[in-house]
Amino acid sequence: MAISFDGKLVVAISSRALFDLSDSHKVYEEDGLNAFQEYQTAHEDDILKPGDAFPLVTKLLAINQLEQGRDRVEVILLSRNSSDTGLRVFNSIEHYGLPITRAAFAGGQSPHRYVSAFGAHLFLSTSPDDVRQVLDAGFAAANILSGGPLEQQDDLLRIAFDGDAVLFSDESERVFQSAGLEAFAESEKAAAWQPLSDGPFKPFLEALHQIQKAFPMEQCPIRTALVTARSAPAHERVVRTLRAWGIRLDESLFLGGLPKGPFLRAFGADVFFDDQQGHCESAREHVAAGHVPHGIANAPPVDP
């Protein structure tokens, strides 16, 4: 009988997002591929330290322990390593007791094409190029920024999202970028009853919501939040869009341009996804941040 991931949340992650591979990556950059391969083989029994997405992955996988005989989350390793050099990664996975059994080792090539093959709802990587290719293919992806806190305050998984160009399309952001804040507010007020188009992270949010619905609210292992620079009256369209989607967000913060970092820390986010690099840089001082290089804010500059 064929194995199916139907009904599961599927997250694909690169080896450098899961573990700290800075030592071997430095060898690769300074001495080339052959030296990297030799280094990885020589150190394959040296356990890697956790990477920036490690706490998030452990909390995701812990959800599978809540219902006997029912796994709701699948985490898959996607790596530019070969299976030979990737042995160190799997030895580290075994050391930490992570139930990750599936992987694609792309042998120096980008593994982005396997995101669709595995049906992943989210891809996490430290390679901006790989992330962009996955986003271009229509899947949620983020570049995990280094430096975020690694400690966990409890077992509850808290995930925070920006709105425009992440959960929603960048259609409203384009108005803001081209015509300014006042025009943006007027446009959103006029379109308050018109749901925003889907952004790249909507399917991931839907998958999270399906897990949430399986638990009583007071026992739910996941808590979600919208953390957006929007404020009234631009909030109404967001509320009505989520209502039209039939998706629950536990908390919504309409900050009107205030720095997001302190609010993300107050929420206790395990990860925050935002399309704007500046917001991610601010957030990473407080929580793990994932940059989503999507939409008008990430468009290449136009030559004069």
Image: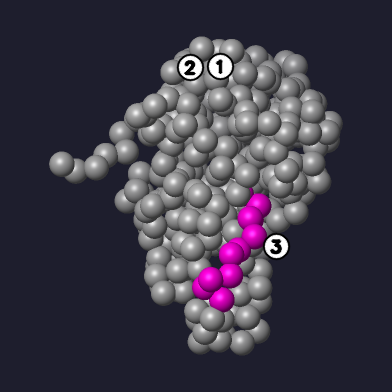
For discs 1 and 3, the disc positioned in front in the rendered view: 1
Relative to 1, does residue 68 appear above or below in the rendering?
A: above
Q: Are marks 3 and 2 in contact (CB under 8 Å)?
A: no
Q: Seen in the image, is 38 located left or right of residue 74?
A: right
- Where does label 1 land, which residue? 219
Q: Quadrant of residue 111?
A: bottom left
Q: CA distance from mark 1 to mark 2?
A: 6 Å
Residue 199, visible in the rendered structure: no
The circle drawn on residue 304 is 3
**Residue at image location 48% in from the left, 17% down from the top:** 215
Q: Residue at x 56, y 76 (%)?
A: 43
Answer whether labels 1 and 2 touch (C-beta < 8 Å). yes
Residue under pointer 2: 215
- Percent across and percent down for residue 253 are 73, 23
What SS does tag 2 mark? loop
Using the rendered view, name the quadrant where residue 71 is placed: top left
- Circle number at residue 101: none
Q: Quadrant of the C terminus?
A: bottom right
